[in-house]
Image (cartoon, rainbow, N blue to C red):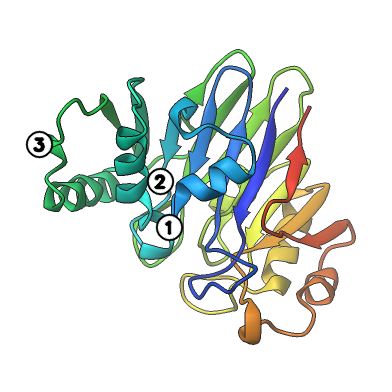
Amino acid sequence: MAKVIILGSSNSISSDLHDNTHMIIVGQERTVLVDCVSSPVQRLERVGVDPKELTDLVTTHFHPDHVSGVPLLLLDMWLMGRKKPLDIYGLHHTLDRLESMMGFYGWNEWPGFFPVAFHRLPAEEMMPVVECSEFRLLSSPVHHFIPTIGLRLEVSASRKSMAYSCDTEPCAEVLRLAAGVDVLIHEASGEGPGHSSARQAGEAARHAEAAKLLLIHYPTGKYQPSDLVEEARSQFAGEIALAEDFMTIDLG
């Protein structure tokens, strides 16, 4: 059984009810955090995930609203007595900078620190990231300001699937990544270089023939537009909703 929990749904300017966009994939074998911001331990514990049991961290790209919480997560898990290894995945561009950032904190000198393995992903479509008996997670490059990946999750038992566009302007890679999925989680920051509007997210869901569209990474708080769902509905006839913090997507 696998589920996805939205830990944050906002674009880079978060609000009191919406943290920056990140999520977690929870299965019996693997627990995979996708991006890491804010104070990660609080969010994980709120959804019933023991940070010491986290198995994998996938970093989509090196922007602060997606990786700013990584140093605090690693520090907190060490202070909590974690001993299990942690696997971290991302593009070369992302992990090179992440390792440099951790170097400024002198993490190599933290006594008794648990093992961390970095896995650099090629910037190619449908690259395997995490595979286990329950599900497989694939990555594809998308079109943002810097090298960035989107993700596709395929659950073995239920044969259900989900795709996450991450931060991207409209591109063919997202359509192939999301082809025929049960749920497409697509950013809706607004139309412009490196990003997409809710209308463009609706277009992507229609062309990919997704069953459901969840809008994420949208302006929140006083910056939130009036009705992003209606904007997306102008292009997509399927089910549409706003992703909300702590929403659970059950993929069986």
Residue found 26% across the figure and 50% down from its top? 93
The residue labelled by disc 3 is 109
Q: Is residue 120 visible?
A: no
Mark 3 surroundings: few (<14), some (14-19) or many (≥20) residues within 10 A: few
Q: Amino acid at mark 1?
A: His
Q: Are marks 2 and 1 in contact (CB under 8 Å)?
A: yes
Q: From what the image shows, is residue 14 above or below residue 44?
A: below
Q: Earlier in the sequence, mark 2 or mark 3?
A: 2
The dot on residue 250 is none
The residue labelled by disc 2 is 59
Q: Are marks 1 and 3 in contact (CB under 8 Å)?
A: no
Instruction: Please state which of the two labelled residues, at mark 1 or mark 3, is closer to the viewer.
Output: 3
Q: Is residue 76 left or right of residue 104?
A: right
Q: Residue 156 lies in what quarter of the image?
A: top right
Residue found 29% across the figure and 49% down from its top? 71
Q: Amino acid at mark 3?
A: Glu
The residue labelled by disc 1 is 66
Question: Mark 2 and mark 3: span between their CA atoms?
Answer: 24 Å
Question: Mark 1 and mark 3: span between their CA atoms?
Answer: 25 Å
Q: Amino acid at mark 2?
A: Thr
